[in-house]
Image (tube, helix red, strand yellow):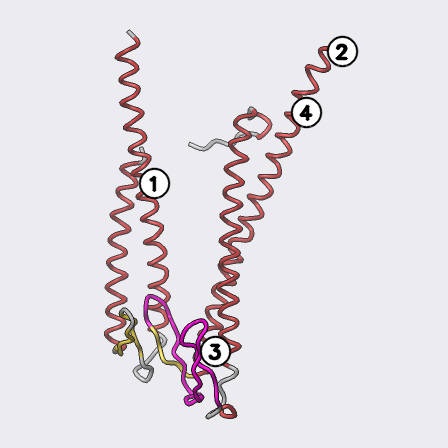
Amino acid sequence: MAEPLQKKLQAELEKYQQLQKELGRAVAARQKLETQLTENNIVQEELQLLDESNCIFRLLGPVLLRQELRQAREHVGKRLQYIGGELKRYEQQELQARP
Amino acid sequence: MAQAVSVAELGLPQLELLKGQLEQEVEFLSSSLAQLKVVQTKFVEAKECLNVLHKGNEGKDLLVPLTSSMYVPGKLQDVRTVLVDVGTGYYVEKSAEDARAFFKRKIEFLTRQMEKIQPALQEKHAMKQAVLEMLAQKLQALTAAPAGAKA
């Protein structure tokens, strides 16, 4: 009589552990994204304070490439949008895994 | 889900768990605070370095590091602008004044963040102390009771 019950408990336990792992992963990914969001916000603020007179460079591998203020602002803006979208996705994942 | 339970009501294993959890939180907050302090020191140093860049030093000889153990001789050519790392791979050419203002802003930002963590850290620390006291009390009560029963 205890056998099928035990099997059922085992299955439920595995499901629970699986959900816990997924939750952990979603939370870790979200923390990483939050860090990137903060950093990109800082960069955007700094870019707002600049004008055309300042030279902006971007580090691509070992090379510093010259960039226009407009380009840089666009790029950071797009990154912020992308991160925002990813954050929402992970938040939803988290909500699903939690209850 | 969370209910306020008096620490006195918790049994020994729960107290142990709580102590472990609070210890972890205190560890994490302390280490974050330390990291922020390190970064802030770097910015303070960078700001001090700017003071070297003035007309009086233009054209002077200096040593440029190529690796951590190899330098090449050079001359200080441009004392007007510096290249500042603003984050996510972006570098901006700024005048010494703008760079100073930038570092000042960063230092203030970090100070504000550290001030935010400080009270949370103190609270967790106080909670941990309370739990440790309760734990000690319970242990004492446990060891005292059988001794009292025997006598």
Residue type at the position of mark 4:
Gln
- Quarter placement of the N terminus of chain A: top left
Provide residue B137's location: percent of width, then percent of height: 66, 28
- Apparent side of residue B111 relative to residue A95 in the rendered image (left or right): right
For label 2, the SS is: loop
Residue type at the position of mark 1:
Gly
Q: Are marks 2 and 1 on the same chain?
A: no
- Quarter placement of the C terminus of chain A: top left
Q: Which residues are magenta?
A: B61-90
Provide residue B32's location: percent of width, then percent of height: 49, 53
Q: Is residue B140 magenta?
A: no
Q: Which residue is mark 1?
A: A24
- The mark found on residue B101 in the picture is none
Residue type at the position of mark 3:
Arg
Do the numbered discs 1 and 3 sit on residues whose CB atoms are within 8 Å? no
For label 1, the SS is: helix
Which residue occupies the foreground of this view, B61 or B91?
B61
In the rendered picture of this protein, how many numbered marks are placed on residues? 4
Which residue lies at the image location 30% right of the left edge and 41% below the top edge? A94
